[in-house]
Amino acid sequence: DKNLSTGNAVRASYRSTPSVGLSNFYISPGDNDPSDMIGAVDRGFYIMDIIGLSSGTNPISGQMSVGAKGLMIEKGKLTNGIKEKKITTDILEFLSSFRMLGDDLQFIPAAGYMGSPSIMLENISISGK
């Protein structure tokens, strides 16, 4: 029946009306220990925070251009802190660039009950200082 609920409604608070949104969404974890994932990287960027995800993502084209903070990875070790780099990709390229998935699935209740393990990506465009 087309009138049955699909379970895709969310509310900002009990005072707001329901609207279409994301809930209970997660990326299935893999079998990799996150520290082993870092140890497997010769040179990379460990992202700790994404800046401007809602304003830097085009929902029509799937293009993403967002800021990120984190640490450099050099020869399998976390090194220098990075204040801001720019990550540019599109959603299909992003999803096809997963190389390894961690075994550390975590949910973020404040973000609509979404969850993800640590993810190692490859071939994503990163620029900045």
Image: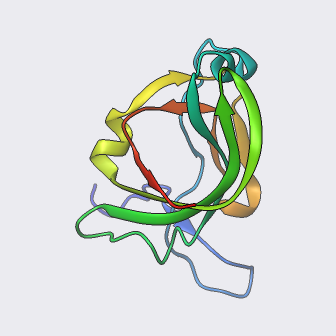
In the foreground, 59 or 8 = 59
| As drawn, 32 above or below 22 | above
Is 95 on the left or on the right of 53, as rendered?
A: left
In the foreground, 14 or 88 = 88
| As drawn, 36 above or below 79 | above
Image coordinates for residue 75, horizontal then vertical, percent = 65, 21
Image coordinates for residue 76, horizontal then vertical, percent = 68, 20
The answer to whether residue 9 shows anywhere in this view is yes
Image coordinates for residue 117, horizontal then vertical, percent = 64, 32
The answer to whether residue 112 shows anywhere in this view is no
Please tell me in which quadrant of the rendered image residue 122 appears.
top left
Image coordinates for residue 88, horizontal then vertical, percent = 38, 58
| As drawn, 70 above or below 72 | below
In the foreground, 16 or 125 = 125
Q: Residue at x 29, y 43 (%)?
A: 93
Is 94 on the left or on the right of 78, as rendered?
A: left
| As drawn, 43 above or below 32 | below
How many numbered marks appear? 0
Quarter holding the N terminus?
bottom left
Quarter holding the C terminus?
bottom right
Please tell me in which quadrant of the rendered image residue 51 appears.
bottom right
In the foreground, 15 or 32 = 32
Q: Residue at x 37, y 33 (%)?
A: 97
